[in-house]
Amino acid sequence: MLAHVRSGKNGAVTSIERSLDPSVAELLKRDAAGLVTAVIQQWDTREVLMVGWMDDEALRRTLTSGRTTFYSRSRGEYWVKGETSGHWQWVKEVRLDCDGDTLLVSVDADGAACHTGDRTCFDARVLPLSRGGVAR
Amino acid sequence: MLAHVRSGKNGAVTSIERSLDPSVAELLKRDAAGLVTAVIQQWDTREVLMVGWMDDEALRRTLTSGRTTFYSRSRGEYWVKGETSGHWQWVKEVRLDCDGDTLLVSVDADGAACHTGDRTCFDARVLPLSRGGVAR
């Protein structure tokens, strides 16, 4: 299905698809809300930056726009990482796991991933291990 | 609340807690099924190995046993990674994200993380990018 049109570099009008590629869509195992989990990882340092949620449309936008796009469960709307902060996440690779319910998105992040200003959403809180970590 | 007892190295009986530490439990923002997302990352290579789900009890077992324990949404039961495959994940650190709904568990993995035998659950499928990756 075709929807939007945009001008290419040479001025020609190019059609882009409105729906997620059916060959990708058929691989997804969505939850009851139609979402899959998206783990966002910095491509070179391999830091896990954040985890968000995508439905088919958010994944389509992520795959076609080059920037991560999520679906907010609390707000019920799409959001592009960086649209308010300027901290874009430029997509380098998207992988799907064996179950089809989780994406691993490799990105090059501009600045902080966390809304708190931290580099990652996991910087602030370490939970206590009762046995002091690795048991061997 | 105390439940199990076990023998310490010196033969003394040691009590361990049955419930998740309340100071941890109060930080969690669980989904409708009582679960949080758990991203499992190899501590040294920083590969994202897999994503699973934990409720309070699975997290308690992960923090206290030194091995990752998950709650299976499909089977409705707890499972310890490695209990059938021998591919244990030894817990080195557990972090909670800013929202309280996702854990990042740093582990030292024995062998394959994926039930297919792959090193990670993300090895097999790369999704096509329509714009060829990074746009800048």
Image (cartoon, coloured by chain):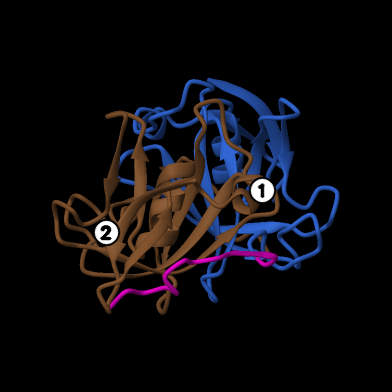
Chain colours: A blue, B brown
Left or right of A7 in this view: B3: left
Is residue B132 visible in the rendered image? The answer is: no
Q: Whole-Å distance between the Cαs marked 1 and 2?
A: 28 Å
Judging by the rendered image, the residue that carries numbered circle 2 is B113
Is residue B28 visible in the rendered image? The answer is: yes
Q: Is residue A130 magenta?
A: yes
Left or right of A111 in this view: B115: left
Task: Kindly state the secondary structure of the residue where label 1 is placed.
Answer: loop
Q: Position of residue B82 (x, y in %)?
A: 21, 57
- Name the residue at the right extreme: A84
Task: Kindly state the secondary structure of the residue where label 2 is placed.
Answer: loop
- State the extent of the magenta-drawn residues as a range: A123-136
The amino acid beneath tag 1 is Leu
Q: Position of residue B64 (x, y in %)?
A: 41, 61
User: Quadrant of residue A15 in the image?
Assistant: top right
Residue B27: image tag: 1
In the rendered image, the vertical position of residue B106 relative to residue B84, given as above or below? below
Q: Position of residue B75 (x, y in %)?
A: 27, 29
Quarter of the figure that contains the C terminus of chain A: bottom left
Few, some or many C-alpha atoms within 10 Å of disc 2 (few <14, some 14-19, many ≥20)? many
Q: Nearer the viewer, residue A129 or A5?
A: A129
Residue at figure coordinates x 69%, y 47% from the top left: B99
| Image marks 1 and 2: residues in contact by CB distance under 8 Å | no
Q: Position of residue A82 (x, y in %)?
A: 77, 53
In the rendered image, the vertical position of residue A12 relative to residue B27, given as above or below? above
